[in-house]
Image: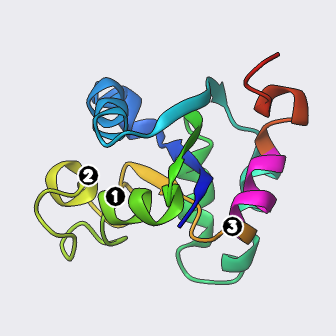
């Protein structure tokens, strides 16, 4: 795998519980480079766009409400096989099923409050990152 980018959101509980530094440190220690990072309170329409594939599912409303309840950290990281590495590092969606050593396995509390969202493919990266960052924010030399 070549160098690629991954889009990550550290969810509201991550900030509330003081876990931002620990999680970012895990990515940096793995050799991923942070290209962009910002803290924002997300508008409902952006979260609905992010999770559009889950519209109509039983957990959708709870997820959207949770993601808009407080500030989040939006990140873009870059590195060799960044998407695959990030997905392996975060672990299964349900923390009860996430392996020890993963972010969710070590730190998350429940399926909705699982601390972190990350894109799962180059296509989802392209779609998701454009919801929250404009092109000039993604150019590391500007």
**x, y (%) of residue 26?**
28, 38
Q: Which mark is residue 122?
A: 3
Q: Which residues are magenta?
A: 124-131
Give the vertical position of 100 relative to 18 (above or below): below
Q: Is residue 86 left or right of residue 139?
A: left
Give the vertical position of 95 relative to 47 (above or below): below
**x, y (%) of residue 30?**
31, 43
Q: Is residue 27 left or right of residue 98?
A: right
Give the vertical position of 90 relative to 18 (above or below): below
Q: Give the residue number, with chain letter if any, for mark 2.
A: 103
**x, y (%) of residue 110?**
28, 62
* Label 2 secondary element: helix
Q: Is residue 15 magenta?
A: no
Quadrant in which the C terminus appears: top right
Q: Give the residue number, with chain letter if any, for mark 1.
A: 90
Residue most extreme to the left: 100
């Amino acid at each position: 795998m070549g160098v690629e980018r991954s889009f990550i959101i550290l969810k509201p509980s991550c900030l509330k519980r003081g876990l931002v530094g620990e999680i970012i440190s895990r990515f940096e220690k793995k050799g991923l480079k942070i290209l962009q990072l910002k803290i924002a309170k997300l508008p409902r329409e952006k979260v609905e766009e992010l999770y559009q594939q889950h519209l109509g599912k039983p957990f959708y409303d709870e997820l959207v409400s949770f993601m808009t309840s407080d500030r989040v950290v939006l990140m873009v990281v870059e590195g060799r096989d960044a998407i695959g590495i990030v997905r392996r590092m975060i672990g299964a969606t349900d923390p009860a099923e996430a392996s020890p050593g993963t972010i969710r396995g070590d730190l998350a509390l429940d399926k909705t409050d699982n601390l972190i969202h990350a894109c799962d493919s180059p296509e989802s990266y392209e779609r998701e990152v454009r919801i929250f960052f404009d092109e000039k924010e993604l150019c590391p030399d500007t």
